[in-house]
Image (cartoon, coloured by chain):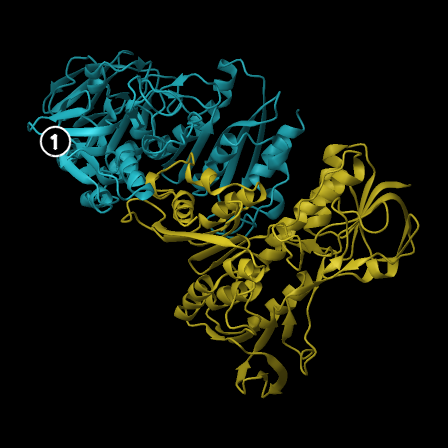
Chain colours: A cyan, B yellow
Amino acid sequence: MKRDILIIGGGPAGISAARFAKLMNPKLEVALVRTSPLMVIPCAIPYSLGRAVPRDSIVIPDSMVTGVGVDLLVDVVVEVKDKVATLQSGEKIEFDKLILAVGSKPIVPPIPGADLENVFFVKDRNSMIRIEEALERAASVVIVGGGFIGLEVGTELRRRGMDVTIVELLPHCLQTVFDEEFCEAAEFKMRSEDIRICTRSTAIGIEEDRGMKRVHLDSGVDLLADVVIFGIGVRANTDLASKMGLELGRFGVKTNQYLETSREGVFAAGDCRTKINFVTGKETPVKLASIAVWEGMTAAANAISEHRREFPGVIGAFATKIFDLSLGMAGLNEKMAQGEGIQYVVGTCEVPDKHPATMPETRNLFLKLIFDRASGSIIGAETQGGDSVGELINFLSFCIGKKMKVDDLVFLQHCSHPLLTPLPSSNPVMLASKDAMMKM
Amino acid sequence: MKRDILIIGGGPAGISAARFAKLMNPKLEVALVRTSPLMVIPCAIPYSLGRAVPRDSIVIPDSMVTGVGVDLLVDVVVEVKDKVATLQSGEKIEFDKLILAVGSKPIVPPIPGADLENVFFVKDRNSMIRIEEALERAASVVIVGGGFIGLEVGTELRRRGMDVTIVELLPHCLQTVFDEEFCEAAEFKMRSEDIRICTRSTAIGIEEDRGMKRVHLDSGVDLLADVVIFGIGVRANTDLASKMGLELGRFGVKTNQYLETSREGVFAAGDCRTKINFVTGKETPVKLASIAVWEGMTAAANAISEHRREFPGVIGAFATKIFDLSLGMAGLNEKMAQGEGIQYVVGTCEVPDKHPATMPETRNLFLKLIFDRASGSIIGAETQGGDSVGELINFLSFCIGKKMKVDDLVFLQHCSHPLLTPLPSSNPVMLASKDAMMKM
């Protein structure tokens, strides 16, 4: 049977493409092929490792795909030629449109000892289970990589009572996303919970040492731990795209603004696709499940409809929580704006996130907004505080996408409640925008 | 000394007008006259009554006004003639522009016993202190009025261990703001915490009964309690405006789109002003501190600048928390849209507010969005769930104000984190908008 749409990859991009295609037109024949028998929510892996949630609860149920009438095949696509995909099992699937959603692969550094027992890369359910088994017998861990995954795994393992050390190449953890003051707040929080952090350090080799692992850093320091976990980023999976002869960009499969690759009728979505930054118009390595979901929907919409939907470029909206400190970011931070030679204006504010500030569980919310000086449009936001940070960054990401001006954000119709928000006169978006307005 | 701007009223509208005027032009001579020696954060009164916060911590420091160089006078304005205000003390203040921000007064029903001891109206710091003193010696309370203030006071007094009964005129509590399903969720939560609710009931009289108060309801039921608190709404304070001969609207002082009253150079902001609904263009009685703040800023901006800022009408963004249930609303609800004869489409979704749903403290988030069928623009939002409701409603209020289309909200660049948001594929705004899109 010929499929209207074949989707390769069962992660966030693949699932959302499959669901959206069936939502728009239930009569379409849609098939999804993926390699893993079980998919997990990728960003929930640290919380399974930390035992905050039961392992099986982070499995994405197949019914997400099969429940809407999409055929699910667990197999490996070994070749795509003309409009036929050949699977490892020998099966051949004829298709009209193809959506590549094959995701990314963890970066494995070429250092001695990276293949030792109890040295891990956070990747999929199998790697997660192997890490969990090793952690059962472990008291100490070295985490190489001070990005989101490294800090979240570190936080959760520390909560379990383990001895945790984080190794980061750059001067600060989280530095690829946040400005210095936010990175320092995150580091302060981790250190106050007795996590050791070695910044400006590279792991150059790992050795066995009496049942433990000895991690050599380029600084000369050696770290000893039961388990080593690498979280130094991921790289687009372009294996199949290369075989198919599709054009590649700097950070993955290249597409046009409709997410169509260099081959007509073949789309790419999610981590395997190289992305264009919404603000700068340049290629960016950013990879997020939330972007993948959105690209999956867009690719599906464009695969099935004549009315093509243009993809405006990625903003990149991040959120994380380190112990009780939540952080969020969207668009460009100040350093990125500087690096792009953009003339910008910064507005900041710091306010209690409930009112009055004596309210139990009140946290200080710090917000930094970046505006383009010439147009007055918001191009970036960074914030830290309590849990309201998540929805606040969603709001600001939306504002960046809609090119809202400083004026739109000063004169804001917002709600206010003692237990849920800052004072009515202290809406943080309003205050930080006012601060920027005064500097324009 | 002649003042550039005289502000009458020291609540949210007056304070924000004063601060904004000085922010825009520090050289302006600005004076603010208010009647109360101490101002409190109005929406925090229930939390002082409930002892969640110390009484003095809800006082708004005078430095909010004086700290930016505004002259503060505690006095009563008895007359405004030409460009001179006369105070009770005899002092006369000459001004160039006047901003009326005299707020509202609680509605006192004309029933026997409303003036008895231990029968209270929630109003200002003095009334709050009197209530607090009475509550020291009380075990039971009847609250007349099942709106926000009634439910919040009820929740907080129940938390203190008091016996609480709420009397509401309409078939449901919160019915002037929410659709039935949200009202019922709030009522269910209150009843599960052993608060009694008498709906479709009016208090028709109060009598002394052996040291307690006996509240007669029109249903024939009598309620006995130590203390009775009324929270049946507020009415614009138009006393001074009437004396001045300013034109009044249905719900307060009438202004044009620049917040200028029928007299040139005299502006009105906050609860004393009758408002225009952003969606319907009709007069609305809605009164909120957050709206007052925004009107105060706008009135100040228009009083000092030739470039006048048009006021687009009020959206009304509400949030409340009843025990652990947070609720929010902005714009029109479904019943209001029906009442206006608007052809609308509803989109809903219900998702766990963290992911996976086994994450500790996960709450179900229910979101209902109302779109205008003809234009596809969002005109209303209602939500209930955990604390993320506050910032979510801020976001949706903004979308209503910017007339965002269903399509803008389906293809959303959002963030996602296990501890802070639903799944990347389950952003509630995206899902509810998708649901609406399918019905259009």
Q: How many marks?
A: 1
User: Which residue has dot 1 on it?
Assistant: A75
Q: Is residue B418 visible?
A: no
| Residue name at image x 27 percent, y 11 percent | A218
Residue A151: image location, x then y, percent? 32, 30
Residue B264 lies, with reference to residue A217, above or below; the image says: below
Instruction: Decide if residue A349 is on the left or right side of residue A25.
Output: right
Instruction: Decide if residue B22 is on the left or right side of residue B242.
Output: left
Crowdedness near tag 1: few (<14), some (14–19) or many (≥20) residues, C-alpha within 10 Å: some
Residue A361 lies, with reference to residue A81, above or below; the image says: below
Residue A395: image location, x then y, percent? 49, 38
Of residue B254 and residue A27, the one placed in the foreground of this image is A27
Q: Secondary structure at mark 1?
A: loop
Residue A165: image location, x then y, percent? 27, 26
Residue A2, picture quadrant: top left
Q: Is residue B69 visible?
A: yes
Residue A292, picture quadrant: top left
Instruction: Decide if residue A258 is on the left or right side of residue A46.
Output: right
Residue B216 lies, with reference to residue B429, above or below; the image says: below
> Which part of the image, by quadrant, shows the N terminus of chain B?
top right
Q: Chain of mark 1?
A: A
| Residue name at image x 66 percent, y 48 percent | B313
Residue B37: image location, x then y, percent? 74, 56
Of residue A183 and residue A91, the one placed in the foreground of this image is A91
Of residue A8 and residue B102, the one placed in the foreground of this image is A8
Callout 1 amino acid: Asp
